[in-house]
Image (cartoon, rainbow, N blue to C red):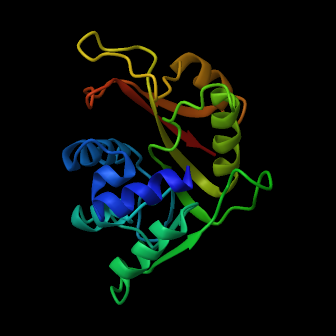
Amino acid sequence: MIERYSKRLDQLGHDVRTLGWGSLEQQRHRFMQTLCCKNFANDKSILDIGCGFGDYLAYLIEKNIPFKNYKGIDINPDLIDQCIKIWKGRNFHASFRVENITEGGQKKSIADIGIMLGLLNLNHYGKIDNYNYSFNLIRNAFSLVSETLIVDFLSSKLTPQYPKEEFVFYHDPSAILEFVLSLTSNVVLKHDYAPIPQKEFMLFLYK
């Protein structure tokens, strides 16, 4: 997975397509859905899991969304190096580091609100069970936040206009909901936004 994104970075540079987004408009549409979370405030810290280039930080700043500080983590050292170059000297209380939250089990809380977008879309073709992988990542991510985790998925409720693709994985919303309810009873499932271009859904897990 690391090699996949490093190759894209070499080919495309600082571009949303490097991160697997179809376009800047699609990326921003997903970001907009996260603002349904009402917990953003001046005293809240943000953890961006799989931060890429720190684009979510740029979006928060552009939209004047209040936050105390921002931590971006990614498993890819090349992307973190890019983040440091992009954000160096800009006083937004931001930090970036390489970290793989799939390892080491549950961890202590390091932020109030966690964002995990686009991390669970790759089809592992049975090399790793996609649902077990997703459950493990969600569990570990939820342990890193003290208040809220926001995570998105491609939905198994496909749109007729868009053909199914083999390299991505489509999660059943009911299966994901059943799992996250084992972590917390305070859950919002958002499945009402327009396809971009495939049908997606977003979960808000509150402690």
Q: Check the image and report above or below for 178 versus 36.
A: above
Q: Which residue sits at x=32%, y=48%?
A: 31
- Image height check: is 118 above or below 2? above
Spot occupied by residue 41 in the image (x, y as percentages of width and height): 41, 64
In the rendering, at what x and y percent does residue 197 appear?
26, 28
- Residue closest to the eye, 103 or 135: 103
> Is residue 184 at least partly visible in the picture?
no
Foreground pick, 161 / 152: 161
Residue 151 appearing in the image: yes
Residue 166: image location, x then y, percent: 45, 22
- Relative side of 86 to 46, left or right: left
**Picture quadrant of residue 36:** top left
Query: Number of marks in the image?
Result: 0
Quadrant of the rendered image containing residue 74:
bottom right
- What residue is at 25 percent from the left and 42 percent from the top? 26
Q: In this rendering, would 4 be left or right of 126?
A: left
